[in-house]
Image (cartoon, grey):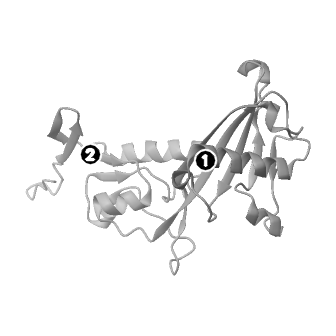
């Protein structure tokens, strides 16, 4: 809730938030609230129509005894029909940038899929998922041997990036200060703002958090 002072024209702001933890729910009075979610959760929590869609990303972290390639990042050509059969769009060999000496001589590979349909990690069991991703890696790199793999972990971020919704302006963004949407004292620190338009870089996500904090600080 907010309290506007008619005598001074200035807002004596007091924002009430309900905080839930193991001990239950309690009401907390704050100077302001920062919502650091994706646009879908922002719509649910604050009732803001963002006109943005989220793009999912699935990533597998593979640790192996041997290096896969001498490149740091490989992105597959989207026009290649065989890409549709692979569960990932890019391979990032982290230990070609940072020495494997720092990781117990293990080579770290990130296999990344962005915004494509297919079998999601939560729809198949772990063994099926592991076999599918490693088989695709072998298909892409015939010299790769699954015997060299020490571990594989797969995770999915349902909102790794944002894009304007169908029919929305291509330049669509959400204001950081949600007072523009009729929610004074609340700021948005997630992707889709002018500060962090796409949500794909750590630096802009940090900048969005700083901007949101500044927006709710008392004058």
Q: Can residue 88 be seen here? A: yes
Give the quadrant of residue 214: top left
- Cα gap from disc 1 to disc 2, whole angstroms: 26 Å
Locate the C terminus by quadrant: top left
Dot 2 corresponds to which residue?
A: 32
Give how far across and how far down residue 198 sits, in percent.
57, 58
Callout 2 secondary element: loop
**Direction left: furthest residue:** 7
In depth, the one of 4 and 65 nearer the eye is: 65
**In the displayed structure, would residue 6 be above or below residue 130?**
below
Give the quadrant of residue 184: bottom left
Q: Is residue 112 left or right of residue 156?
A: right
Q: Nearer the viewer, mark 1 or mark 2?
A: 1
Give how far across and how far down residue 64 sits, in percent.
77, 31
Q: Can residue 59 be seen here? A: no
Dot 1 corresponds to which residue?
A: 201
**In the displayed structure, would residue 111 be above or below residue 24?**
below
Q: Is residue 166 left or right of residue 41?
A: right
Give how far across and how far down residue 120 sits, in percent.
57, 56
- Pointer 1 or 2: first along the chain: 2
Query: Dot 2: few (<14), some (14–19), or many (≥20) neighbours within 10 Å?
Result: many
Q: Assess whether mark 2 and mark 1 are in contact (beta carbons under 8 angstroms).
A: no
Give how far across and how far down residue 116 sits, in percent.
64, 64
**In the displayed structure, would residue 176 be above or below residue 94?**
below
**In the displayed structure, would residue 108 be above or below residue 123?**
above
Callout 1 secondary element: loop
Residue located 26% across and 45% down the image: 32
Query: Dot 1: few (<14), some (14–19), or many (≥20) neighbours within 10 Å?
Result: few
Residue located 41% across and 61% down the image: 40
Residue located 73% across and 56% down the image: 89
């Amino acid at each position: 809730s907010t309290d506007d002072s008619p005598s001074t024209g200035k807002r004596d702001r007091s924002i009430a938030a309900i905080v839930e933890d193991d001990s239950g729910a309690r009401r907390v009075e704050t100077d302001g609230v920062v919502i650091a979610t994706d646009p879908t959760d922002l719509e649910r929590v604050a009732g803001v129509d963002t006109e943005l869609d989220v793009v999912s990303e699935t990533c597998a972290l593979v640790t192996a005894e041997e290096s896969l390639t001498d490149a740091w990042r490989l992105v597959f050509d989207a026009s290649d029909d065989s890409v549709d059969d692979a569960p990932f769009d890019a391979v990032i060999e982290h230990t070609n940038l940072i020495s494997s000496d720092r990781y117990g001589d293990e080579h770290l590979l990130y296999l990344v899929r962005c915004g494509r349909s297919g079998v999601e990690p939560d729809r198949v069991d772990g063994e099926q998922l592991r076999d599918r991703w490693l088989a695709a890696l072998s298909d892409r790199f015939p010299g790769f041997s699954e015997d060299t793999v020490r571990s594989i972990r797969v995770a999915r971020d349902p909102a790794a990036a944002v894009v304007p919704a169908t029919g929305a302006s291509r330049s669509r963004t959400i204001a950081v200060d949600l007072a523009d949407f009729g929610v004074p004292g609340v700021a948005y620190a997630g992707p889709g703002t002018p500060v962090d338009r796409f949500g794909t870089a750590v630096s802009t996500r940090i900048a969005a958090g700083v901007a949101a904090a500044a927006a709710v600080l008392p004058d």
